[in-house]
Image: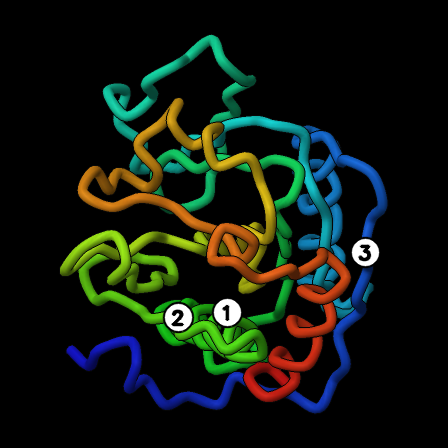
Amino acid sequence: MRPRSSLALALKTGLPARWETSSGLVSYEDALARMERETLAIAKSEAPELVWLLEHPPLYTAGTSAKDGDLVAPDRFPVHKTGRGGQYTYHGPGQRVAYVMLDLRQRGHDVRAFVAGLESWIIATLAAFNVKGERREDRVGVWVRRPEKGPGIEDKIAAIGIRVRHGVSFHGISLNVDPDLSHFSGIVPCGVRDHGVTSLVDLGLPVTMEDADLALHGAYRDIFG
Protein backbone atom coordinates (compact mmCIF):
# COMPACT_ATOMS: atom_id res chain seq x y z
CA MET A 1 0.00 0.00 0.00
CA ARG A 2 1.38 3.40 -0.97
CA PRO A 3 1.98 5.96 1.78
CA ARG A 4 -0.52 8.80 1.89
CA SER A 5 2.16 11.30 0.89
CA SER A 6 2.66 9.55 -2.47
CA LEU A 7 -0.99 9.12 -3.44
CA ALA A 8 -1.42 10.63 -6.88
CA LEU A 9 -5.04 11.08 -7.83
CA ALA A 10 -6.94 13.81 -9.66
CA LEU A 11 -8.77 15.58 -6.85
CA LYS A 12 -9.46 18.69 -8.88
CA THR A 13 -12.60 19.46 -10.84
CA GLY A 14 -13.53 22.42 -12.98
CA LEU A 15 -16.60 23.13 -10.88
CA PRO A 16 -16.16 25.87 -8.25
CA ALA A 17 -17.25 25.09 -4.70
CA ARG A 18 -19.16 27.57 -2.59
CA TRP A 19 -17.22 29.08 0.29
CA GLU A 20 -19.00 30.35 3.36
CA THR A 21 -17.63 31.79 6.61
CA SER A 22 -19.93 31.99 9.64
CA SER A 23 -19.44 34.70 12.23
CA GLY A 24 -19.90 33.96 15.91
CA LEU A 25 -20.01 30.45 17.34
CA VAL A 26 -22.09 27.80 15.58
CA SER A 27 -23.63 25.04 17.71
CA TYR A 28 -22.58 21.53 16.80
CA GLU A 29 -26.21 20.44 16.43
CA ASP A 30 -26.91 23.21 13.92
CA ALA A 31 -23.75 22.45 11.98
CA LEU A 32 -24.50 18.75 11.78
CA ALA A 33 -28.08 19.38 10.63
CA ARG A 34 -26.88 21.69 7.89
CA MET A 35 -24.19 19.28 6.72
CA GLU A 36 -26.84 16.58 6.42
CA ARG A 37 -28.98 18.86 4.24
CA GLU A 38 -26.12 20.09 2.09
CA THR A 39 -24.66 16.63 1.53
CA LEU A 40 -27.98 15.32 0.25
CA ALA A 41 -28.46 18.33 -2.04
CA ILE A 42 -24.96 17.93 -3.48
CA ALA A 43 -25.50 14.21 -4.02
CA LYS A 44 -28.69 15.01 -5.96
CA SER A 45 -26.89 17.69 -8.00
CA GLU A 46 -29.23 20.28 -6.52
CA ALA A 47 -26.42 22.38 -5.01
CA PRO A 48 -22.72 22.98 -5.70
CA GLU A 49 -20.02 21.71 -3.36
CA LEU A 50 -19.44 23.65 -0.14
CA VAL A 51 -16.50 24.55 2.08
CA TRP A 52 -17.88 26.00 5.31
CA LEU A 53 -15.58 27.81 7.74
CA LEU A 54 -16.75 28.30 11.32
CA GLU A 55 -15.96 28.15 15.02
CA HIS A 56 -17.77 26.09 17.65
CA PRO A 57 -18.31 26.74 21.35
CA PRO A 58 -16.15 24.45 23.54
CA LEU A 59 -17.16 20.81 23.02
CA TYR A 60 -15.83 17.32 22.49
CA THR A 61 -16.81 15.02 19.64
CA ALA A 62 -16.55 11.23 19.61
CA GLY A 63 -15.82 9.56 16.28
CA THR A 64 -16.67 6.01 15.36
CA SER A 65 -13.41 4.69 16.88
CA ALA A 66 -13.65 6.64 20.16
CA LYS A 67 -12.69 4.72 23.32
CA ASP A 68 -14.44 5.46 26.62
CA GLY A 69 -11.13 5.69 28.47
CA ASP A 70 -10.01 8.57 26.26
CA LEU A 71 -12.73 10.86 27.64
CA VAL A 72 -10.83 12.09 30.69
CA ALA A 73 -13.29 14.79 31.85
CA PRO A 74 -16.79 13.77 30.69
CA ASP A 75 -18.51 16.63 32.53
CA ARG A 76 -16.23 19.43 31.37
CA PHE A 77 -17.86 20.26 28.02
CA PRO A 78 -20.75 18.80 26.01
CA VAL A 79 -19.85 15.54 24.28
CA HIS A 80 -21.33 14.80 20.87
CA LYS A 81 -21.29 11.37 19.27
CA THR A 82 -20.82 11.69 15.54
CA GLY A 83 -20.60 9.41 12.54
CA ARG A 84 -17.26 10.73 11.31
CA GLY A 85 -14.16 8.59 11.44
CA GLY A 86 -11.60 8.94 14.20
CA GLN A 87 -11.68 9.19 17.96
CA TYR A 88 -12.17 12.10 20.41
CA THR A 89 -11.51 15.65 19.27
CA TYR A 90 -11.98 19.08 20.79
CA HIS A 91 -13.56 22.06 19.06
CA GLY A 92 -13.74 25.57 20.45
CA PRO A 93 -13.16 29.28 19.90
CA GLY A 94 -9.86 30.09 18.23
CA GLN A 95 -9.92 26.91 16.20
CA ARG A 96 -10.83 27.14 12.53
CA VAL A 97 -13.14 24.31 11.56
CA ALA A 98 -13.58 23.71 7.85
CA TYR A 99 -16.43 21.42 6.93
CA VAL A 100 -15.72 20.12 3.44
CA MET A 101 -18.64 18.86 1.39
CA LEU A 102 -17.17 17.67 -1.90
CA ASP A 103 -18.53 15.26 -4.48
CA LEU A 104 -15.96 12.47 -4.46
CA ARG A 105 -17.73 10.84 -7.39
CA GLN A 106 -16.19 13.66 -9.45
CA ARG A 107 -12.82 13.40 -7.71
CA GLY A 108 -11.70 9.83 -8.19
CA HIS A 109 -13.86 7.96 -5.64
CA ASP A 110 -10.77 7.34 -3.49
CA VAL A 111 -11.40 8.25 0.17
CA ARG A 112 -7.79 7.58 1.17
CA ALA A 113 -6.54 9.94 -1.52
CA PHE A 114 -9.07 12.52 -0.35
CA VAL A 115 -7.75 12.34 3.21
CA ALA A 116 -4.23 12.74 1.82
CA GLY A 117 -5.49 15.80 -0.05
CA LEU A 118 -6.87 17.29 3.16
CA GLU A 119 -3.50 16.73 4.82
CA SER A 120 -1.75 18.41 1.90
CA TRP A 121 -4.17 21.33 2.16
CA ILE A 122 -3.31 21.86 5.82
CA ILE A 123 0.43 21.48 5.20
CA ALA A 124 0.31 24.07 2.41
CA THR A 125 -1.71 26.41 4.65
CA LEU A 126 0.89 26.14 7.41
CA ALA A 127 3.68 26.76 4.90
CA ALA A 128 2.19 30.20 4.28
CA PHE A 129 3.30 31.02 7.85
CA ASN A 130 6.69 29.27 7.48
CA VAL A 131 5.50 26.38 9.64
CA LYS A 132 6.50 22.90 8.51
CA GLY A 133 3.55 20.59 8.98
CA GLU A 134 4.13 16.88 8.58
CA ARG A 135 1.97 13.79 8.12
CA ARG A 136 2.52 10.54 9.95
CA GLU A 137 1.63 7.16 8.47
CA ASP A 138 0.54 5.78 11.85
CA ARG A 139 -1.69 8.69 12.89
CA VAL A 140 -4.04 10.98 10.98
CA GLY A 141 -3.67 14.72 11.22
CA VAL A 142 -0.84 17.19 10.79
CA TRP A 143 2.08 17.50 13.19
CA VAL A 144 4.90 19.93 13.91
CA ARG A 145 8.25 19.08 15.47
CA ARG A 146 9.07 20.82 18.76
CA PRO A 147 12.85 20.46 19.22
CA GLU A 148 12.81 23.21 21.85
CA LYS A 149 10.79 20.83 24.06
CA GLY A 150 13.20 17.95 23.60
CA PRO A 151 14.37 15.40 21.04
CA GLY A 152 11.59 13.63 19.20
CA ILE A 153 8.84 15.85 20.61
CA GLU A 154 6.09 16.84 18.20
CA ASP A 155 2.63 18.33 18.66
CA LYS A 156 -0.57 18.06 16.70
CA ILE A 157 -1.73 21.30 15.10
CA ALA A 158 -4.63 20.07 12.94
CA ALA A 159 -7.12 17.20 13.01
CA ILE A 160 -9.00 15.44 10.23
CA GLY A 161 -12.23 13.46 10.45
CA ILE A 162 -14.58 12.78 7.58
CA ARG A 163 -17.60 10.77 6.60
CA VAL A 164 -18.87 9.98 3.11
CA ARG A 165 -22.52 9.55 2.19
CA HIS A 166 -23.92 9.10 -1.32
CA GLY A 167 -20.40 9.77 -2.60
CA VAL A 168 -20.20 13.19 -0.91
CA SER A 169 -17.84 14.03 1.94
CA PHE A 170 -18.76 15.89 5.08
CA HIS A 171 -17.16 16.87 8.38
CA GLY A 172 -13.56 17.88 7.56
CA ILE A 173 -10.60 19.52 9.27
CA SER A 174 -9.80 21.67 12.29
CA LEU A 175 -6.76 23.94 12.47
CA ASN A 176 -5.58 25.32 15.78
CA VAL A 177 -5.10 29.05 15.29
CA ASP A 178 -5.41 30.31 18.88
CA PRO A 179 -7.66 28.03 20.96
CA ASP A 180 -7.32 27.52 24.70
CA LEU A 181 -4.97 24.53 24.60
CA SER A 182 -5.86 23.58 28.18
CA HIS A 183 -9.27 22.49 26.88
CA PHE A 184 -7.65 19.54 25.13
CA SER A 185 -6.72 18.04 28.51
CA GLY A 186 -10.24 16.68 28.96
CA ILE A 187 -9.64 14.05 26.28
CA VAL A 188 -6.86 12.01 24.76
CA PRO A 189 -6.94 13.80 21.39
CA CYS A 190 -7.45 11.27 18.60
CA GLY A 191 -6.29 8.54 20.96
CA VAL A 192 -2.65 9.69 20.87
CA ARG A 193 -1.18 9.76 24.37
CA ASP A 194 2.49 10.34 23.65
CA HIS A 195 2.25 13.76 21.97
CA GLY A 196 0.74 17.14 22.75
CA VAL A 197 -1.18 19.80 20.86
CA THR A 198 -0.14 23.22 19.66
CA SER A 199 -1.46 26.18 17.68
CA LEU A 200 -0.09 28.85 15.38
CA VAL A 201 -0.12 31.37 18.21
CA ASP A 202 1.45 28.85 20.59
CA LEU A 203 4.30 28.57 18.08
CA GLY A 204 4.88 32.29 18.50
CA LEU A 205 3.08 33.51 15.38
CA PRO A 206 0.62 36.43 15.63
CA VAL A 207 -1.84 34.81 13.23
CA THR A 208 -5.48 35.91 13.20
CA MET A 209 -8.42 33.84 12.05
CA GLU A 210 -8.65 36.07 8.98
CA ASP A 211 -5.00 35.34 8.17
CA ALA A 212 -5.67 31.61 8.47
CA ASP A 213 -8.73 31.85 6.23
CA LEU A 214 -6.76 33.60 3.48
CA ALA A 215 -4.10 30.90 3.64
CA LEU A 216 -6.74 28.16 3.53
CA HIS A 217 -8.33 29.74 0.46
CA GLY A 218 -5.03 29.97 -1.38
CA ALA A 219 -3.88 26.45 -0.56
CA TYR A 220 -7.25 24.88 -1.42
CA ARG A 221 -7.05 25.89 -5.08
CA ASP A 222 -3.80 24.02 -5.63
CA ILE A 223 -5.17 20.80 -4.14
CA PHE A 224 -8.85 20.71 -5.07
CA GLY A 225 -9.20 23.27 -7.84
Where does the N terminus fall, quadrant-wise?
bottom left
Amino acid type of the residue tagged 3 in the rendering: Thr
Upstream in the sequence, badge 1 or badge 2? 1
Upstream in the sequence, badge 3 or badge 1? 3
Position above or below: 103 against 75? below
What kind of element bears circle 3? strand
Tell me where residue 54 appears, x and y as whole percent: 72, 48
Q: Residues within 10 Å of mark 3 (few under 14, many from 20)?
A: few
Say whether residue 20 is visible.
yes
Tell me where residue 24 appears, x and y as whole percent: 83, 38
Location of residue 143 by image quarter: bottom left
* Alpha-carbon span between mark 3 and mark 1: 17 Å
Upstream in the sequence, badge 2 or badge 3? 3
* Alpha-carbon span between mark 1 and mark 2: 8 Å
Report the residue marked by disc 3.
21
Report the residue marked by disc 1.
122
* Marks 3 and 1 close (CB-CB < 8 Å): no
Where does the C terminus fall, quadrant-wise?
bottom right
* Marks 1 and 2 close (CB-CB < 8 Å): yes
Amino acid type of the residue tagged 2 in the rendering: Gly
Report the residue marked by disc 2.
133
Taking 71 as reference, is 109 left or right?
right
What kind of element bears circle 1? helix
